[in-house]
Amino acid sequence: MSGADTRWHVYADPTEVARKTAERILTAADRAIAARGVFRIVLAGGRTPEQAYRLLRDADTDWSRWQVYFGDERCLHPQDPQRNSVMAARAWLDPMPIPQDHIHPIPAERGAKAAAQAYAQVIAQALPFDLVLLGMGEDGHTASLFPGQAHTESESVHAVHDAPKPPPERVSLSRRALGDAREILILVTGEGKRDALRRWRAGEPLPVASIRGPSGVDVLLDQATRS
Ligand code: 6PG
């Protein structure tokens, strides 16, 4: 096991994981808005988060208090459907009454290095985040932190080159910026994740295992991930 601070929650299927995620996002928003008047959330790419985002369209919350950030982005044209910002916009954000300047896409179209530098300035005002959402890839990557890639630890945002999952050029928040969050939810669904999950639970130093929040990490799984 990778540590007492990692809490594993198993649900029937991806739909249940998405429902629970949407519920937890809204609870975190209520708590943050009551305590500090603002809710700062970091979004993940991936299929299960997308399902959760769709469920948030009907939520009853004060959208004007939300500030939305992204954990990683692919260096593609701003309207490219492969971008996490475009997925989130289509699944959820576009019709919501969130002020446009409260949504903070990573300017990845500028190239990994310039975008990482620019986004470091953007998130400097936002740390620690209230809630960070993450997925996990089949190789144990999370956000765009991939196995075997080294980054400068002092950076809050990394330029990623040669990513093994296309496209190779990406931008990713660092382990530290993600891990400082008040709450961290990692969503893992589907049988393709079994092996990485087993390795994570066995204590292998996968990128996903390196994210450790001050209040621990909650991993939301579906049955298919269990062998
Ligand atoms: C990306 C994602 C990535 C994703 C995982 C899980 O841009 O590639 O941010 O880190 O979250 O690969 O994705 P799935 O939920 O679709 O398997």
Image: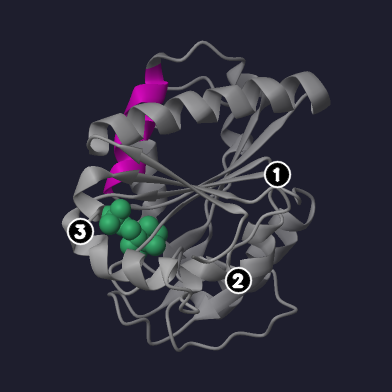
**Mark 2 vs 1, N-terminal side:** 2
Residue 167: percent from left, percent from top: 30, 74
Q: Residue drawn 46% across and 22% down?
A: 96
Asked if residue 58 lies in the magenta stretch, the reply is: no
Task: Indicate which label's residue lies in the foreground, 3 or 1.
Answer: 3
Distance between the alpha carbons at the discs numbered 2 and 1: 23 Å
Q: Which residues are magenta?
A: 47-57
- Compare residues 107 and 160 and report the one nearer the observer: 160
**Camera-nearest residue between 186 and 205:** 205
Q: If you read the primary sequence from the N terminus, does the residue marked by circle 3 or circle 1 appear first?
A: 1
- Which residue bears the numbered disc 3? 227
Q: Nearer the viewer, mark 2 or mark 1?
A: 1
Few, some or many C-alpha atoms within 10 Å of disc 3 (few <14, some 14-19, many ≥20)?
Answer: few
Name the quarter showing ligand 1: bottom left
Say which mark, if any, is on residue 84: none
Query: Does residue 48 appear left or right of residue 209 in this picture?
Result: left
Q: Is residue 143 left or right of residue 126?
A: left
Q: Amino acid at mark 3?
A: Ser
CB-based contact (under 8 Å), mark 3 and mark 2:
no
Q: Residue furthest top?
A: 60
Residue at position x 68%, y 62% in the image: 177
Q: Secondary structure at mark 2?
A: helix
Mark 3 or 2: the one toward you: 3
Report the disc number at residue 182. Answer: 1
Query: As rendered, which of 136 and 126 lies closer to the eye?
Result: 136
